[in-house]
């Protein structure tokens, strides 16, 4: 207690008192030093150097710069790009894909393996493949195949529809087409027949039943398939995607099953078809030690398969190469404690050691990195529609005779200082609860309760400002930041555009793309357009762990405020759903040119007509229904002709419009 007792005043319900709230502005929440906020401070705050290098940085104008070729030159101002695209009628939310980043990622991965191969004198090759499931968008897969040509980069299909894409798109001689996932006769036959087209298809057996199917299909077609086995390793990834390995994993063969498969192939005189060992221990492996364990185990299985008589030629280490979403370079789930080079070195060195020790030729190394290739190439840019703040100021001091609780809260507010702020917080909470109790019992009016609550928020704000200046924040005050956060309403559906943020709390770096030379004085969580309380983002990257509020700028009247969500090019697009019928966002493909940039493709987002079609509504029928209702209303003179025309016009125009809010 800060030193006063409380008596609930009974009697005067205060209803008649008119309160003229002379609202005084509070001192700015974040200490606003007299020196100007610098872009370096923004860099540190949003950790852009950690997760953004070498593609994203901040320029002198305080805008985000994209350098799609990394450190090899060429860059553009993201804010200016967004404005230029808006002038071309490409409204927000907008997904911007940078083809050059995709190319750079493929080059980096291949360069890392080639460097490791040279460093360890590995007498074999690296042949990567891109797992189509990570991002199936046609323009992306097509560019990927094109950029991959110099490296004979192939594709991986995890289902029949993905096999359809891969077969029709991959035209790189010698590149691998790895066929994973559940397979039926048609899948296997198609994959085998594709050899006749010049495709290097490798069918990876994931279930014991597939062995018989593959043997049968091979005999029937008179073509020898190239087969692989997916092993269930004992080593497994940890965290979100750790369930992909281990004895009880969904996919792959246990060691006894692998031996059975070998026996079955031998009996069918097809053991020479078995040429690849595959494993996939999960996505986003944060800890290099898990990668090392897996490759040691797999290398041993590989050499054992050679000794059993299989015609082994490939070792496929699957996916799992992580992305440093928070830039912390740690084994935190949103990060990774290694780089691509460390990864390649560990794979190459271990396989070489094991094969050399057994005096066996080394395999061609295959990896199926999806996330590490596709995550960086797209940026989702969206605007803020409005904000809601818990408190806007301090009410006028209470007059004599006003409810005692209000006096108590006012005195608490006045007394808050560096020494007593923690105690004052508990007082404020208690007084506010008493005010609510008094209201429930009929001892305080609505106006009194409102004033009490406003004083309470004013106390919290003052206390928070002090708490932020402290080295150490007492535990009981930690939630204050969350309670006091503003809500920024964003023109986006989290379910459509960042499903993993909603489903598994995945972290993506989010930050303003402009005004980065201004101090962000607000702290906020983000709420999306859906009517779902889960449609929000309240976890943000931080150096340590996760923060629950994001530093943002106060909105300026008449000026848009743009945020970017970065590193979201892997998995998000296809897993996004139509919750509340918010459809695909507009997407553009940009590449750098010597003069600036070029828009390679524009993929317009879904119209309402399209999303309604997904749930079997025919736009014409809908319009017809409105027309009939209007006709009826006209006859009964409930609507004027003009009104009905306006209504129908709006209705029809909406159907062919964007599902998001337009400025
Ligand atoms: C999902 C998947 C991948 C891709 O994993 P990333 O972690 O995105 O690289 C690779 N291989 C298989 C079999 C997969 O299921």
Image (tube, helix red, strand yellow):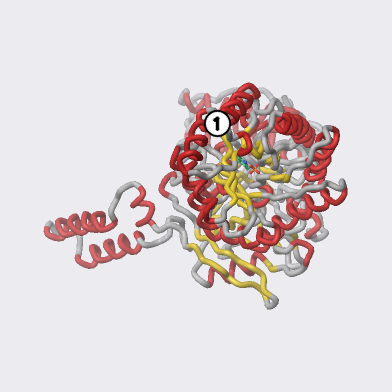
Q: Nearer the viewer, residue 447 or 163?
A: 163
Toward the bottom, the furthest residue is 595
Mark 1 secondary-structure assignment: loop
Q: Is residue 593 left or right of residue 31?
A: left
Residue drawn 55% across the image and 46% down it: 157
Give percent across and percent down for residue 328: 78, 43
Horizontal side of 194 relative to 318 (left or right) equals: left
Residue 1: in sight, yes or no? yes
Residue 97 image point, x, y percent: 60, 60
Q: Quadrant of residue 319?
A: top right
Is residue 414 visible to the viewer in this orientation of the structure?
Answer: no
Q: Out of 199 and 448, give the one closest to the viewer.
A: 199
Above or below 662: residue 547: above
Give the residue drawn at x 67%, y 31%. Answer: 239
Q: How many marks?
A: 1
Give the image location of residue 594, x and y in percent: 70, 76
Q: Is residue 16 left or right of residue 386?
A: left
């Amino acid at each position: 207690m800060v030193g006063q007792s409380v008596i609930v005043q009974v009697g005067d319900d205060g209803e008649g008192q008119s309160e003229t709230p002379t609202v005084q502005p509070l001192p700015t929440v974040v200490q606003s030093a007299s020196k100007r906020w610098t872009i370096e401070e923004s860099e540190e705050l949003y950790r852009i150097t950690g997760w953004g290098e070498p593609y994203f940085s901040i320029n002198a104008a305080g805008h985000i710069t994209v350098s799609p070729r990394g450190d090899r030159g060429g860059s553009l101002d993201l804010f200016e790009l967004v404005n230029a695209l808006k002038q071309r009628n490409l409204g927000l939310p907008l997904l911007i894909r940078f083809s050059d980043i995709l190319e750079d990622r493929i080059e980096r991965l291949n360069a890392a393996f080639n460097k490791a191969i040279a460093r360890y004198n590995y007498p074999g090759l690296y042949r990567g493949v891109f797992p189509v499931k990570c991002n199936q968008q046609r323009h992306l897969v097509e560019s990927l195949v094109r950029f991959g040509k110099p490296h004979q980069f192939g594709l991986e299909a995890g289902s029949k529809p993905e096999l359809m894409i891969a077969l029709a798109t991959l035209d790189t001689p010698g590149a691998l087409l790895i066929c994973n996932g559940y397979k039926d006769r048609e899948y296997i036959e198609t994959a085998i027949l594709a050899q006749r087209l010049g495709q290097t298809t490798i069918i990876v057996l994931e279930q014991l039943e597939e062995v018989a199917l593959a043997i049968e299909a091979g005999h029937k077609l008179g073509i020898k398939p190239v087969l692989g086995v997916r092993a269930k390793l004992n080593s497994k990834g940890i965290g979100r995607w750790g369930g992909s390995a281990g004895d009880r994993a969904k996919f792959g063969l246990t060691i006894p099953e692998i031996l059975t498969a070998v026996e079955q192939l031998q009996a069918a005189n097809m053991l020479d078809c078995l040429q690849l060992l595959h494993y996939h221990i999960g996505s986003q492996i944060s800890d290099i030690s898990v990668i090392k364990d897996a490759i040691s185990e797999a290398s041993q299985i590989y050499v054992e398969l050679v000794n059993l008589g299989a015609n082994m030629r490939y070792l496929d280490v699957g996916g799992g190469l992580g992305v440093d979403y928070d830039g912390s370079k740690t084994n935190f789930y949103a990060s990774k404690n290694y780089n691509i080079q460390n990864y390649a070195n560990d794979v190459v060195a271990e396989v070489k050691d094991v094969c050399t020790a057994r005096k066996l030729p080394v395999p061609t190394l295959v990896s199926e990195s999806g996330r590490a290739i596709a995550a960086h190439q797209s940026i989702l840019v969206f605007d803020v529609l409005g904000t809601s703040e818990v408190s806007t100021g301090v009410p006028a001091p209470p007059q004599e005779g006003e409810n005692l609780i209000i006096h108590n809260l006012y005195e608490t507010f006045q007394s808050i200082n560096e020494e007593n702020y923690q105690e004052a917080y508990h007082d404020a909470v208690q007084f506010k609860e008493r005010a609510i109790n008094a209201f429930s019992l009929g001892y305080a009016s609505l106006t009194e309760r409102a004033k009490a609550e406003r004083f309470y928020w004013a106390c919290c704000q003052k206390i928070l400002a002090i708490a932020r200046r402290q080295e150490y924040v007492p535990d009981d005050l930690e939630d204050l930041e969350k309670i006091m956060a503003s809500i920024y309403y964003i023109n986006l559906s989290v379910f459509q555009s960042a499903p993993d943020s909603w489903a598994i709390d995945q972290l993506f770096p989010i930050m303003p793309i402009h005004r980065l030379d201004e101090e962000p004085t607000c702290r906020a969580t983000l709420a999306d357009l859906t009517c779902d309380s889960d449609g929000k983002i309240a976890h943000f990257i931080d150096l340590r762990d996760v923060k629950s509020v994001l530093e943002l700028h106060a909105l300026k009247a008449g000026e848009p405020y743009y945020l970017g969500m970065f590193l979201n090019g892997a998995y998000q697009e296809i897993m996004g759903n139509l919750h509340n019928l918010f459809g695909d966002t507009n997407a553009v493909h940009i590449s750098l040119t010597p003069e600036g940039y070029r828009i390679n493709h524009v993929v317009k987002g879904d119209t309402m007509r399209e999303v309604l079609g997904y749930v079997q509504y025919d736009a014409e029928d809908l319009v017809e229904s409105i027309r009939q209702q209007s006709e009826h209303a006209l006859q009964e003179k409930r609507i004027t002709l003009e009104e009905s025309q306006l209504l129908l016009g709006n209705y029809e125009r909406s159907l062919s419009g964007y599902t998001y809010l337009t400025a």
